[in-house]
Image (cartoon, rainbow, N blue to C red):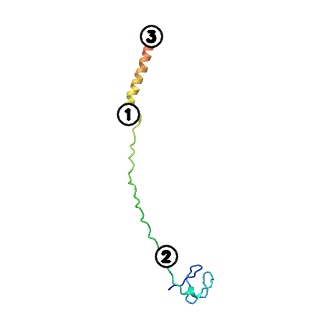
Amino acid sequence: MAKICQSCGAPLVEDAKFCISCGQAVSPAEQFEPVVQQPVAPMPPIPPQYQQAYYPPFPIQAKEPIYQRWWFWLIVGIFATSILGNIIFLYEEFF
């Protein structure tokens, strides 16, 4: 049986009168006292950790410049027609 110091818990040499670690005197009763280990409680089960699914980001599509879109030119045409129409209308009124 292993012998353990009652003061510090260090293991003792077979015929030791004093503990090597703390210097405490070892009584004869301590020398032959069996070491009783405390029962260890089982660890609780670890809950599973789920990993989130990976979704790759949507590919970013490059937008074409605004002057290459048909609706842009439609708006520009309507605006230019209205401006020219007003200029012609005002020009005819003065002359």
Q: Is residue 55 above or below residue 22?
A: above
Q: Position of residue 83 (x, y in %)?
A: 43, 20
Q: Camera-side residue: 41 or 46?
A: 41
Amino acid on which disc 1 is placed: Arg
Q: Nearer the viewer, residue 58 or 32?
A: 32
Front residue of 90/27: it is 27
Secondary structure found at label 2: loop
- Give the Cα distance between marks 2 and 1: 81 Å
Label 2 crowding class (10 Å Cα cut-off): few <14, some 14-19, many 20+? Answer: few
Q: Is residue 36 above or below residue 65?
A: below
Instruction: Find disc 2 in the rendering and name its residue.
Output: 38
* Residue type, label 3: Glu
The disc, 2 or 1, on the residue closer to the chain's N-terminal end is: 2
Direction front: furthest residue: 29
Measured from the top left, where is residue 58 in percent x and y? 38, 47
Q: Nearer the viewer, residue 86 or 37?
A: 37
Disc 1 to disc 3, C-alpha distance: 37 Å
In which quadrant of the rendered image does the C terminus lie? Answer: top left
| Residue under the point 41% across and 34% down | 66
From the image, state whether disc 2 or disc 1 is nearer to you. Answer: 2
Distance between the alpha carbons at the discs numbered 3 and 2? 111 Å
Q: Which residue is mark 1?
A: 69
**25 with respect to 82 (left or right):** right
Q: Residues within 10 Å of mark 1 (few under 14, many from 20)?
A: few
Which of pointers 3 and 2 indicates the residue nearer the eye?
2
Residue located beneath label 3 in the image: 93
Answer with mark 1 or mark 3, whichever residue precedes in sequence: 1
Q: Position of residue 60 (x, y in %)?
A: 39, 45
